[in-house]
Image (cartoon, helix red, strand yellow):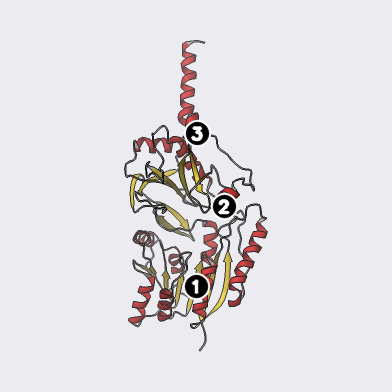
Amino acid sequence: MRKSEENNKFRKKENAKKQHGSKSERPEKHICPPGECDLAKKCGGCQYQGMDYEKQLNKKHREVKELLGSFGKVEPVIGMQEPFHYRNKVNATFQRLKNGTVISGAYQQGTHSVVKIDECQIEDKIADGIIYDIRGMLRSFKIKVYDEDSGYGLLRHVLVRRGFRTGEVMVVLVLASPILPSKNNFVKALREKHPEVTTVVVNVNDRRTSVVLGERNITIYGKGFIEDELCGLRFRISPSSFYQINPVQTEILYGKAIEFAGLTGKEKVIDAYCGIGTIGMAAAGKAGSVIGVEVNRDAVRDAVTNAKRNNMKNITFCNEDAGEFMVKMAAQGETADVVFMDPPRAGSDEAFLSSLLQLSPKRVVYISCNPVTQARDLKYLTSHGYRVERCQPVDMFPWTYHIENIVALVQKIR
């Protein structure tokens, strides 16, 4: 072989390495056939793996009916046409095995043992590919993964969020220290593999905690946030902002919630637990005015920006506890026609529900990701002047036992 041919062959090999990563940087990927998952029992994240999707919907309907049927009719569950790869937010934790191999994936249910996952059938494919390639890059950048027992190591988690309609991708590297070695080269190498990445953020979590994100974010590439479109509106999403993980079903969920609100264009609306303002902004076009209330300062900042970006004049946001805010409104003689409430899995406490009663809106739209706590809260509200008018479950989380449910409550006629 001539020397020039030898050099060309070498250059081709090197280019292939740059484009696809060397063998050491690209661990063998394990992929299950569609509709099957041999990690289901180990991981525990998809409790309904192996069950026909129609059967899943029927089972979820029976469960909601059992919990909420005494309040009124429960409509059939609205399911997905394509119930795969719907999660637009993917979080992976990392672990170093005794033999030195680094794996990434999810904690086995009820433990802190990591189940190695290369590709998950409910997670966004692009997000999974990014996490897989970051895992392959760790050795060449001499990045040690964090050990929970010793507190030694740097990389704790990788969080990837992708805009469903915009395609923008945020990568959040959750580190035990604010310093990422060779950060510029790391970002460059990552974007060579994944040019779709539009921003990279270092989140500093230096506490001994099981909470994924720390309080400090350092943008090392891009804007530090992504944007997405939902219900015809554009939203800014920061690393710690709450944003529904299933955008396809979220549009259905919010559409139903707004339908249940019975808006005519004149109503004063409160969006409690408003997050980045998604429900309130979706309702604002059909309401007289909307006030979004949220205790998370970062989410409120995003909400204000979102309202400006969408040129919405009839919505304002308050960085306060929603219950305290409604008590103050009632004390000042103010009222509201509709209150949207979308609390966390624990539901609402009695203090919040009591404040809701003081404000006495004509209609309440209660969105819940936990029908058990929703049933508890409905019992309180229906014994204090409200009745359930409609109840609609929406399957936001196929292959799992989770279900989202919307309930419309109206004041009883006295």
Residue that badge 2 annotates: 44
Q: Position of residue 251 (x, y in %)?
A: 52, 61
N-term-proximal mark, 1 vs 2: 2
Residue 343, compared with residue 116, is above or below; it is below
N-term-proximal mark, 1 vs 3: 3
Residue 121, compared with residue 384, is above or below; it is above
**Would you call the spot at circle 2 few (<14 residues within 10 Å), some (14-19), or many (20 or more)?**
some
Closest to the observer: 134 or 247? 134
Closest to the observer: 399 or 233? 399
Q: Position of residue 130 (x, y in %)?
A: 47, 42
Q: Secondary structure at mark 3?
A: loop
N-term-proximal mark, 3 vs 2: 3
Residue that badge 1 annotates: 365
**Would you call the spot at circle 1 few (<14 residues within 10 Å), some (14-19), or many (20 or more)?**
many
Q: Which mark is residue 26?
A: 3
**Would you call the spot at circle 3 few (<14 residues within 10 Å), some (14-19), or many (20 or more)?**
some
Foreground: disc 1 or disc 2: 2
Q: Position of residue 379 (x, y in %)?
A: 52, 77
**Is 321 positioned to the left or the right of 7 in the image?**
left
